[in-house]
Amino acid sequence: MTPEIAFRIGAAITYQASRRVKHAPRVVIGKDTRVSGYLFETALAAGVCALGGRVMLSGPLPTPAIAHITTSMRADAGVVISASHNPFEDNGIKVFSGAGEKFTEELEQQVEAIIADASWHVPAGDAPEVEQVDYRSEYASHLRAILPNVDSFRGIRLAIDCANGATTTIAPRLFEDLGFDVRCIGCEPDGRNINLKVGSTAPEQLARMVVEDGYPLGIAYDGDGDRAIFVDDKGKIVDGDAVMLMCAKQMKREGRLKGNAVVATVMSNIGLEIALRDAGIDIVRCPVGDKYVMEEMIGRDIALGGEQSGHVIFSEYLFTGDGIVTALSVVRAMVDTGRDLAALAGELVTYPQVLVNVRVKDKKALDSVPAIKAVTDAVETRLTGAGRLLIRYSGTEPLLRIMIEGKDQREIQGWADEIAAAVRTHLA
């Protein structure tokens, strides 16, 4: 990431948008709390304006806020400057369409091709004057609609960790306005302390506070606020799989679970699949990445999907992960069922998992090697209805990854070793 690249990205997004609209493209630009965001914000805005676009700057806001504002303001694209859960030295750019959805691979490739074209020159110009707008109240109003009866939530004690990131601009005030009794850590960003020993990747401090001070739950966001993980009253981490299960069951009871299914990635535990099946809910698997979750949800018209990491998408609100929406939905399930977080999360029985990596010389199709196919077919037969086998080649290394989930750790380890031995014999 350099200002020059950010400038070309801004220009390329505007050029691509101008092919689809007849007016000057309107682009919303937001960022997290990294000190470098101010530099890249200016460069992006200059690139947009150089191609005749109009820029609306939001200042620091969560990524999902920019997705929402892009649609509510009828902008043609939304851009977020953030490196999510990474340290402050890193930065990156996320792009949303006018529909508030992350760019598809096709759109990404179009923009990347424009940026990489050495013959494409962006006209130079003076630094633009752009519109600075405070969108916090607009986003907060959108979030308040998630709780149908605010009075039911007044006085609930919450511990939240904003990772010194983008949710510091929204979450503490929102929860207080809704009547929660809030205590916040990671709420003093200085441009350099985002994700520093706080947030969803470092929830230890939050867990200690929850246990020591007797909070019923803790909520930890990542730097740009598009995901959340939770801590129950005993200090145990509650991940995205457990959140999807409790929210799916709650939504089904309320008649809101469109599609009667949940989209989850191949990394979600088999325990989620079994628990959903027992609740009469289907599961749709997709590759790792919230973008792929979103695409399956749109294609199948499904209301809920997400990742074990805490990215959870509620399509009735937005087609991107939103940590605050997720938190409000979890609290809603707790209040409506009268059960604490530990009890709701306890309905997910996480099965043991074994992961074995085998170095290979040749990435042949596994079905084309009879000995390997025979052992994998045998393992899948043993796992039927009570486990899962996932085998895939690494995209970046000469490795075959063998993942098995099942009821007995020793048993599945033995099966993984059987497959690994066959692979070493025929592909290593």
Image (cartoon, rainbow, N blue to C red):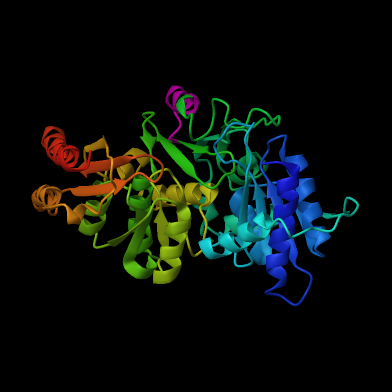
> Where residue 403 sits in the image (x, y, percent)?
24, 42
> Where residue 1 sits in the image (x, y, percent)?
67, 41
> Dividing the image into 4 quarters, which one contains the C terminus?
top left
Nearest the viewer among 367 and 49 is 367
Answer yes or no: is residue 253 visible: no
Give the total of numbered labels. Answer: 0
In the displayed structure image, the side of residue 199 where residue 336 appears, left or right: left
In the displayed structure image, the side of residue 152 where residue 363 appears, left or right: left
Nearest the viewer among 350 and 185 is 350
Residue at image coords 60%, 67%: 99
Nearest the viewer among 32 and 138 is 32
In the displayed structure image, the side of residue 251 where residue 421 appears, left or right: left
Say which quarter of the image contains residue 212. top left
Vertical comparison of 113 with 179: above or below: below
**Hey, which residue is sitting farthest bottom in the picture?**
22
> Where residue 267 sits in the image (x, y, percent)?
33, 47
Residue at image coords 84%, 55%: 130
Vertical comparison of 387 with 109: above or below: above
- Predominant SS of the magenta segment: helix
**Hey, which residue is sitting farthest right in the picture?**
126
Nearest the viewer among 131 and 94 is 94
Vertical comparison of 213 with 304: above or below: above
Residue at image coords 33%, 64%: 261
- Give the residues drawn in magenta, as a range: 205-217
- Magenta region includes residue 123: no
In the displayed structure image, the side of residue 234 where residue 186 appears, left or right: right
> Where residue 207 sits in the image (x, y, percent)?
44, 27
Vertical comparison of 52 with 220: above or below: below
